[in-house]
Image (cartoon, rainbow, N blue to C red):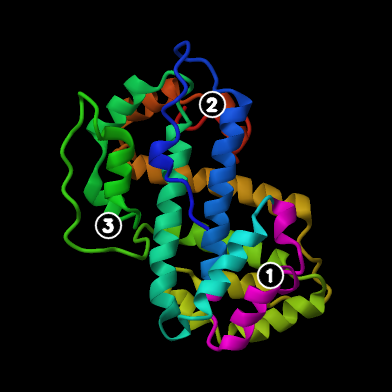
């Protein structure tokens, strides 16, 4: 499945300054985000398998592999399954392939969220972002494709600034907050796929064969094991709880990514600008916390 490049999608809405985007536009953006989130999950799981059998199982029937639970969270089983099917032919170097696919999908998510976060007349906001982006941080700290980010907001515009493609390819997130938050998000999604406490315990035992590859993929395996290796009397994750975790963690990751991308972590002026210009009412339809007043 080829994802639509988010850099080419979102510049079609131009109405009144400061107004919310239409639900149709936001729904399309959210669909892109969930497709890319599904790709990340697929590669995180398929890329960490140490034998062909579980990868082949996921390719043949991803619903049986995840007990059909992931679709209830809005994820796209066909996209997850595609990662498994590609990995069936690349088991020997699936970790390297998964890292590149995870980086691409994570970049697409960030760009899609950002392109739709500033209402229906965002050109001045895009200009501000283009002028503030720290491409070194985007590459080195966030492990995102800084070239794609630059193209989405700066290319073919009168205020375009030049960016230099990184001289080295960073595939694992260096920022410790995002590293742990993304790991906790994966742990929730993976644990949620268990139908019974016995399933969860089997996944715990199987994780012994996955955790080294997961470390290479930039996942804190201790966080994942703590989510899987629980007593049988510990309740399974509920759908509502898992949805809330997915929403809250996705929001926190986006805030941290944007803060680092524009050097706003300790800059009150930049934070005030983001608070004023982000269309907070749209964030819920982008899969983030409803009525979130980020940076305010």
Provide the secondary structure element on which disc 3 rests. Answer: helix
Residue 95 makes an appearance in the image: yes
Q: Nearer the viewer, mark 1 or mark 3?
A: 1
Distance of mark 3 from mark 2, alpha carbons?
A: 28 Å
The location of residue 272, given as percent across then percent down, is 38, 24
Image side of residue 114 versus residue 46, left or right: left
Residue in the picture at 22% in, 50% down:
136
Which image quadrant is residue 199 in? bottom right
Tag on residue 140? 3
Horizontally, residue 260 falls left or right of residue 226, namely left
Q: Which residue is mark 1?
A: 62
Instruction: Inspect the magenta stretch and tell me whether residue 68 lies in it.
Output: yes
Q: Local crowd at mark 2 within 10 Å, few (<14), some, or many (≥20)?
A: many
Label 1 secondary element? helix
Checking the image for residue 208, the label placed there is none
The answer to whether 14 is drawn above or below residue 231 in the figure is above
Mark 2 = which residue? 280
The part of the chain drawn in magenta is: 45-73
**Circles 1, 3 touching at the beta carbon (< 8 Å):** no
């Amino acid at each position: 499945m080829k994802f639509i490049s988010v850099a080419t999608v979102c510049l079609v809405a131009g109405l009144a300054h400061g107004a919310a985007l239409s639900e149709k536009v936001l729904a399309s953006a959210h669909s892109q985000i969930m497709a890319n989130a599904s790709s990340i999950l697929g590669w995180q799981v398929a890329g960490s398998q140490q034998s062909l059998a579980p990868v082949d199982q996921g390719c043949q029937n991803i619903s049986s592999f995840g007990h059909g639970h992931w679709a209830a969270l809005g994820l796209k089983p066909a996209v997850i399954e595609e990662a498994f099917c590609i990995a069936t032919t690349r088991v020997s170097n699936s970790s390297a392939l998964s890292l590149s696919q995870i980086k691409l999908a994570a970049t697409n998510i960030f760009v899609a969220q950002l392109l739709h976060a500033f209402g229906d007349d965002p050109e001045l906001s895009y200009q501000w972002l283009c002028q503030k982006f720290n491409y070194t941080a985007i590459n080195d700290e966030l492990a995102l494709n800084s070239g794609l980010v630059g193209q989405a907001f700066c290319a073919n515009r009168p205020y375009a600034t030049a960016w230099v493609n990184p001289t080295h390819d960073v595939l694992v997130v260096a920022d410790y907050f995002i590293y742990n938050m993304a790991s906790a998000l994966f742990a929730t999604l993976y644990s949620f796929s268990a139908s019974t406490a016995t399933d969860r315990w089997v996944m715990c035992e199987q994780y012994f064969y996955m955790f080294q590859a997961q470390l290479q993929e930039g996942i804190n395996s201790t966080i994942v094991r703590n989510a899987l290796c629980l007593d049988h009397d510990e309740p399974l994750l509920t759908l509502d709880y898992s949805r809330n975790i997915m929403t809250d963690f996705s929001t926190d990751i986006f805030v941290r990514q944007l803060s680092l991308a524009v050097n706003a972590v300790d800059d009150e002026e930049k934070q005030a600008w983001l608070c004023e210009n982000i269309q907070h009412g749209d964030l819920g339809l982008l899969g983030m916390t409803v009525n979130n007043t980020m940076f305010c």
